[in-house]
Amino acid sequence: MNATLEAMVPYDIRVIGDPVLSTRAKEVTDIDGTVAALVEDMFEVMYDAPGVGLAAPQVGVSRRIFVFDSDDRAGVLINPEIVESDGEWEFVEGCLSIPGLHWSVVRPRTVLLRGVDLDGNPVELEATDFEARIFQHELDHLDGVLLVERLTDEQRREAKRALRELALSASGPTPSAGLQLP
Ligand code: NI
């Protein structure tokens, strides 16, 4: 295969305001070559960004798939669900779909996830702290929930201001009207 073509990723990371990010993604019913190719592209987009996790809706595909690389391990989870969560952990979280902004958010410290891998085999992943945070964040994306919806009222007020400024300073063909909070 042509290496140059292989290296070309046809996806842009969608940003806040794009409807695909606020839509619940559909279950994957058929894990075929299309899904495998998508996952490969998602890894590339994630590493290019660079990011530690990426959900399919972030590349405009409304399907329940995310990829991650927590440094400890990397992988893909299809149709994931959180079956157990425990504890509390505060961590400063960002999102590739809300570029440049970060907020301190409390979420469960430990999670147990179930899903399937690219071969359709069941997978169970237990994660703590940073990795658990990635999983919860990406799972939110699959439910159409963005980080801004996890903020306190005060953080959300600041976020609105920051996003307005971001919209005003945004250049390029994308209209800034998309950068609005509900
Ligand atoms: Ni995100």
Image: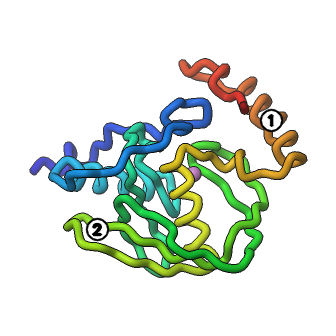
Q: Position of residue 14 (x, y in %)?
A: 50, 37
Residue 84 sits above or below residue 153 on the image: below
Q: CA distance from mark 1 to mark 2?
A: 37 Å
Picture coordinates of residue 1, whole percent (x, y): 9, 51
| Three-letter amino acid code of the residue under disc 2 | Asp
Residue drawn at the location 50% of the way across and 72% of the way down = 83
| Residue at the farthest front position | 83
- Given residues 68 and 30, the one toward you in this image is 30
| Structural crowding at the residue carrying mark 2, measured as other residues with C-alpha within 10 Å and reported as few (<14), some (14–19) or many (≥20) | some
Q: Is mark 1 within 8 Å of ligand 1?
A: no
Q: Is residue 106 left or right of residue 69?
A: right
Above or below, 94 against 60 in this view is below
Q: Is residue 45 left or right of residue 9?
A: right
- Residue at point 20%, 47% (across, down): 34
* Element assignment for label 1: helix
Question: Of tags 1 and 2, which is closer to the observer?
Answer: 2
Name the residue that disc number 2 marks.
117
The residue closer to the viewer here, 178 or 108, is 108
User: Is 108 on the left or on the right of 81, as rendered?
Assistant: right
Residue depicted at 72% across the width and 32% down the height: 181
- Disc 1 residue type? Lys
Q: Mark 1: few, some, or many residues within 10 Å (few <14, many ≥20)?
A: some
Residue sticking out furthest to the left: 1
Disc 1 marks which residue?
Answer: 160
Residue in the image at 51% along x and 58% along y: 139
